[in-house]
Image (cartoon, rainbow, N blue to C red):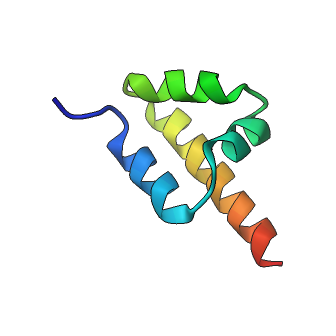
Amino acid sequence: MTKANTDVRSHLKQSDIFIWEVAKELGIHESSLYRLLRTEMTNEQKQQIIDVVTKIQKERSV
């Protein structure tokens, strides 16, 4: 059985951004984000997470 949202999970892993940082930026609790990752998300939800990761990466590079 494969995990849901493997594309988002791999993006998070490659970015070296912590889950809690993404959750904080989204305004949700860390455990809520883990719960979202359990079932396949819509493309819009996935894109929102990827956008947040990109934003955090840009902030770190400044």
Q: Above or below — where is 60 with respect to 5?
A: below
Give how far across and how far down residue 16 sits, in percent.
Answer: 57, 62
Name the residue furthest bottom: 62
Give how far across and how far down residue 53 sits, in percent.
Answer: 63, 55
Image quarter of the N terminus: top left
Which residue is depicted at the point 51% across and 53% down?
Answer: 12
Which residue is depicted at the point 62% across and 22% down?
Answer: 32
Task: From the viewer's perspective, tell me whether residue 36 is left or right of residue 4.
Answer: right
Give how far across and how far down residue 47 sits, in percent.
Answer: 54, 45
Name the residue furthest left: 1
Q: Above or below — where is 38 with respect to 17?
A: above
Name the residue furthest right: 62
Task: From the viewer's perspective, tell me whether residue 38 is left or right of residue 28.
Answer: left
Task: From the viewer's perspective, tell me whether residue 32 is left or right of residue 35.
Answer: right
Q: Quadrant of residue 23?
A: top right
Q: How many labels does the image show?
A: 0
Which residue is depicted at the point 69% across and 66% down?
Answer: 57
Q: In which quarter of the image is residue 49?
A: top right
Image quarter of the C terminus: bottom right
Which residue is depicted at the point 44% across and 46% down?
Answer: 8
Give how far across and how far down residue 26 sits, in percent.
Answer: 73, 36
Relative to the observer, which residue lies in front, 24 or 54?
24
